[in-house]
Image: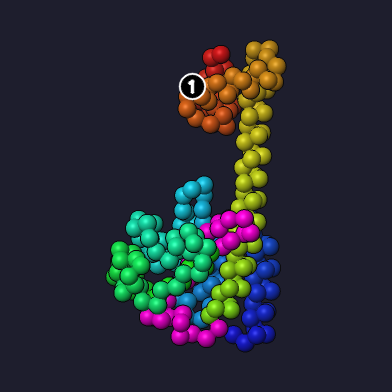
């Protein structure tokens, strides 16, 4: 793409990202954009951190899913290194890259992918994931012009969009959990004549006894999974 076409592409990408709400939809838009705009990119995926676990969350097709699975299983590869080091991680020849002796040969054998690059998605506080680009050619990204600039712009868009989507999802989950706990406390207060603090204390002690989160106890109580009576106190 020339400069004007690239500017128009990213303007349209921004509009598409504003129109979606969920983390999954956001990531699917981004991996599709990677294949469309980054020279040499045949397949793409995004992995992000969920707590301390790496989640292979979106892929432009099955190739990305397979490669992320191999990488996660081998606990090595460009994506993991991009997240761990917060640096762009390039492999021009996966089959012969000494950094990933398990992942590289398996990736080539399983998918025909020969080169890849992982871009860390850093939101200013932490690396929340990585944008992974795959090429079927050796030196697929090194030999293509304008890869670095285009991919860097896309990674910046990806970081902002993914961070915003994750924040929205976390806020929605927090509100839902708060509502569940509120409903459970209300049920206990109505049944047993407890005040709000006493009702929450019952939920808290039940969660410790059952070794589950307070939210899970509240959900079971609201949905009838704990029976008609409140947890013992």
> Is residue 131 found left or right of 14 in the rendered image?
left
State the image coordinates of residue 168 (x, y, percent, origin top left).
65, 50
Q: Which of 13 and 106 is in front in this view?
A: 106
Up-down: is 195 above or below 156?
above
Q: Judging from the image, what secondary structure is the residue with disc 1 in?
A: helix
Taking the spot 50% from the left edge, 30% from the top edge, the residue there is 212
Taking the spot 52% from the left edge, 47% from the top edge, the residue there is 51
State the image coordinates of residue 175 (x, y, percent, origin top left).
67, 39
Residue 142 shown in magenta:
yes
Residue ID for mark 1: 209
> Is residue 212 found left or right of 92 in the rendered image?
right
Q: Quadrant of the N terminus?
A: bottom right
Residue 53 shown in magenta:
no
**Residue 230 visible from this viewpoint:** yes
**Residue 46 visible from this viewpoint:** no
State the image coordinates of residue 126 (x, y, percent, origin top left).
58, 56
Taking the spot 41% from the left edge, 73% from the top edge, the residue there is 91
Up-down: is 230 above or below 151?
above
Please give the range of residues in magenta.
121-146
Q: Which of 4 and 29 is in front in this view?
A: 4
Q: Nearer the viewer, residue 173 or 140?
A: 140
State the image coordinates of residue 135 (x, y, percent, origin top left).
42, 76
């Amino acid at each position: 793409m020339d400069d004007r076409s690239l500017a128009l592409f990213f303007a349209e990408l921004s509009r598409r990202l504003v129109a979606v709400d969920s983390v999954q939809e956001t990531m699917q838009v981004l991996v599709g954009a990677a294949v469309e705009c980054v020279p040499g990119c045949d397949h793409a995926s995004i992995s992000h951190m969920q707590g301390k676990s790496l989640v292979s969350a979106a892929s432009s097709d099955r190739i990305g899913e397979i490669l992320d699975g191999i990488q996660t299983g081998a606990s090595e590869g460009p994506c993991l290194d991009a997240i761990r080091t917060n640096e762009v991680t390039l492999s021009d020849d996966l089959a012969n890259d000494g950094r990933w002796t398990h992942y590289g040969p398996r990736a080539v054998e399983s998918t025909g992918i020969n080169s890849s690059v992982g871009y860390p998605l850093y939101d200013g506080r932490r690396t929340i994931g990585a944008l992974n680009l795959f090429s079927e050619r050796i030196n697929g990204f090194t030999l293509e012009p304008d890869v670095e600039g285009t991919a860097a712009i896309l990674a910046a868009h990806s970081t902002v969009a993914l961070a915003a989507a994750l924040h929205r999802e976390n806020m929605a989950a927090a509100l839902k959990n708060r509502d569940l706990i509120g409903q459970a406390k209300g049920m206990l207060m109505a049944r047993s004549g407890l005040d709000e603090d006493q009702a929450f204390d019952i939920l808290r002690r039940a969660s410790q006894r059952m070794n589950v989160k307070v939210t899970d106890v509240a959900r079971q109580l609201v949905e009838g999974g704990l029976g008609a009576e409140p947890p013992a106190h």
